[in-house]
Amino acid sequence: MSSSVMTKLPFDEKLIYINGKWSASSSTQSCNVENPDTAEIIAVVPECTAEDLDQAVQAAYTAFHDGPWVNEYSGAQRRDAMLALADAIEEHRRNIELIESINTGKPISDVRGELDDTIDLFRHFAGYADKVEGRHIAAQTNSTLEGYTTKVPVGVVGFINAFNYPICLLAWKVAPALAAGCTIVFKPGPQTPLTTQYFAYLVDQTGKFPPGVFNVVLGGVGVGQALVDHDLIDKIGFTGSVATGKHVIRSTASTRNVRATSVELGGKSPGVVMPDADLEKTAKLAVSGCMSNTGMNCNALTRLWVHRSIYDEFLPLLKAAAEAITLDTPQLETTEMGPLIDRRQYERVLEYIRIGKEEDKASVLTGGEPTLGRGYWIQPTLFYNVSPKARIATEEIFGPVLSVLEPFDSLDEVIEIERKSEFGLAAGIFSRNHQDIAKFTRKLRSGTIWVNTFNPLYSYLPFGGFRNSGFGRELGYESFDGYLVSKAIIDDISY
């Protein structure tokens, strides 16, 4: 399956897309792209240079300030371009799904859902493109002065994407930015560039986007730093680790031109199981909330609180749910969980499993070992009787590891502990008691709180966090508004 992936690419993956053209990088360095199921190399792409990056930013800058995308296109024309792009993604979705599954190791059934979301996101945000509105403010002190506001696109946006949802997170970022009228330089995660390149191919094929509106650079830290540091960038959007996100924030503050920044960072999301919960259903929801995308979710449920009165009854249900997950070739319809993305992440997760056993002295309920004898596969792993202060319970692992914490007696004690967490991206509660639900959702500082479910996200609802989980919002109107800036106009009509 992997060896055939390159026959599915309608573009040359050794080229980069800048200013409406596919061209060679100035670099002599390259990056290997792997299939994490087998660790086989499936593509070789360029490691872009600062020179490549500068060309991409200059193209986006010229397209924004002098091109038709901002200066001639109406909102309705941008809307129609985005709808054409959504149609193109839908037309090519089978190829994109296969490439994404092979490059990421995601089960093909999961990738189908992500393509559904991607198409929906472009159609959803296309609806905002012709609805950029300002306000008229009545004169306060002088009847001849008229005041009003307009909203304008923030400008050239540089995006640095994570590896865990390549095409879907691209849509989260690019769709609202295009709708607002921005131009873009996009850097995918170095492990997963192929569907970003495919997306650039479709941008080009629609014929609806002027040169320079969307540009792609490939590579790792070097080109990412050059993007963050470039003086012609007006906003940076970043998804990734806390450490790198803090570095991005410091870098954008120290450049010659301070620019807007939106960062979606890590999480250590808690779930709370109350005594009145449906235990069998909740066990399946909790395990899927952690193991979805092999635990490589910033919002994954990784800290599970279970009430003392149901603790011993609940653990076997969790164990059964985890052991029922099917691990197999990601392109098979029956596969439910895939491998980790690369050797670095594989070794990181195995190290945290060691820490859980040896340093945190936690008990293993199930899993904890490599599996399948190839690639970067690790069993779904459950620890129990884990101290809330243990490393596996407080540090983001980004893998299929769930810590069932020591049993609790009162919801208030859980809330008090969780409010002091360094993270605040997501949380969940499983209960039928509306007073407990209301208390939890009101008092917890988390950007998304699920009640009797975990993980669903929608194009029309904002997603983002508090504290070390970042700031700014993806999805929803809030995301679109984040790519607009208000201007105040004051006009003396008596002149």
Image (tube, rainbow, N blue to C red):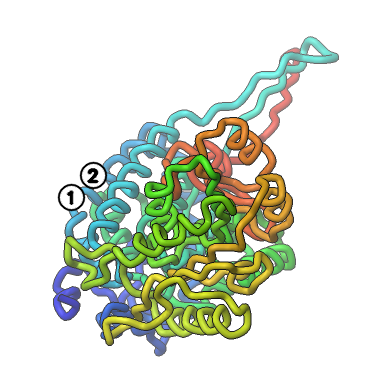
Tag 2–tag 1 contact (CB < 8 Å): yes
Q: Amino acid at mark 1?
A: Glu
Q: Nearer the viewer, residue 98 or 359?
A: 359
- Mark 1, residue position: 91
Left or right position of 80 against 356 = left
Number of marks in picture: 2
x then y, percent, for residue 48: 44, 78
x then y, percent, for residue 245: 62, 66
x then y, percent, for residue 102: 25, 71
Q: Which quarter of the picture shows residue 399?
A: bottom left
Identify whether 259 is placed above or below 69. below
- Mark 2, residue position: 87
Left or right position of 235 against 370 = right
Local secondary structure at mark 1:
helix
x then y, percent, for residue 447: 59, 46
**Residue pictured at 58% horizontal, 61% vertical:** 268
Q: Residues within 10 Å of mark 2 (few under 14, many from 20)?
A: some
Q: Quadrant of the N terminus?
A: bottom left
Q: Farthest bottom residue?
A: 28
Cα separation between marks 2 and 1: 6 Å
**Residue pictured at 41% horizontal, 84% vertical:** 343
Res. 45 visible in picture: yes
